[in-house]
Image (tube, rainbow, N blue to C red):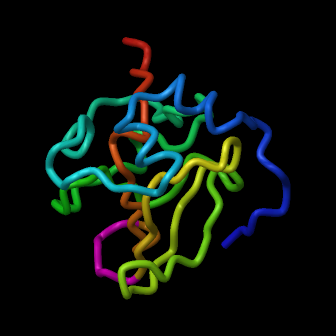
Amino acid sequence: MNSFENSPTVTKSDSQWREELSPAEYKVLRKAGTERPFTGEYWDSMQEGVYECRACGAELFTSKEKFSSHCGWPSFFAPLAEGTVRYLHDKTLGMERIEVRCTACDSHLGHLFKGEGYDTPTDERFCINSICLTLRPADPA
């Protein structure tokens, strides 16, 4: 797992983030909130393309790593590339979890869960809030 070795390349003041993001986006991306399960735009989408950070546009995941986990949030078994996301230990809500953040802008994306038994190459589930992502559809062939 990578740590946060470098400072974010996208830095904005809190007021800039509030101006650019909707209140719901701000709550999740900047304040580590969570959207309700089975309500987000991409939880059950299998459309091909690249998922970008809604706050800064950094490429984070692709549809090639997306899978149906039936948990109510988009699930990926790996990020698009090493270093696109960073990890923090999260001890909120009385649980120990691994928080996933965008390396470029330090926005909260969701959590990483390991060893749940999914039939994926990594047996990892990046459980990401739809509101944190923008899908850039693949070009039609």
Closer-to-camera residue (18/3): 18
Q: Position of residue 5 (x, y in %)?
A: 84, 62
Give the answer, above or below, for where 15 lies relative to 114. above
Left or right of 5? Residue 1 is: left
Give the answer, above or below, for where 33 lies relative to 61. below
Q: Main secondary structure of the magenta part?
A: loop
Instruction: Give the residue displayed 16% in from the left and 44% down from the top.
Output: 39
- Residue that protrudes farthest toward the front in the picture: 15
Which image quarter: residue 64? top left
Say if the magenta span includes residue 90. no
Q: How many marks?
A: 0
Closer-to-camera residue (2/18): 18
Q: Position of residue 20 (x, y in %)?
A: 53, 23
Which image quarter: residue 141? top left
Q: In this picture, which residue range is highlighted in magenta?
A: 115-120
Closer-to-camera residue (34/71): 34
Give the answer, above or below, for where 125 lies relative to 28. below
Instruction: Give the residue displayed 39% in from the left and 86% down from the top.
Output: 95
Left or right of 55? Residue 73 is: left
- Residue that protrudes farthest toward the top in the picture: 140
Q: Position of residue 97 (x, y in %)?
A: 45, 79
Instruction: Give the residue displayed 44% in from the left and 65% down from the top.
Output: 111
Closer-to-camera residue (86/136): 86
Instruction: Give the residue displayed 53% in from the left and 61% down from the top.
Output: 100
Q: Position of residue 1 (x, y in %)?
A: 66, 73
Which image quarter: residue 112? bottom left
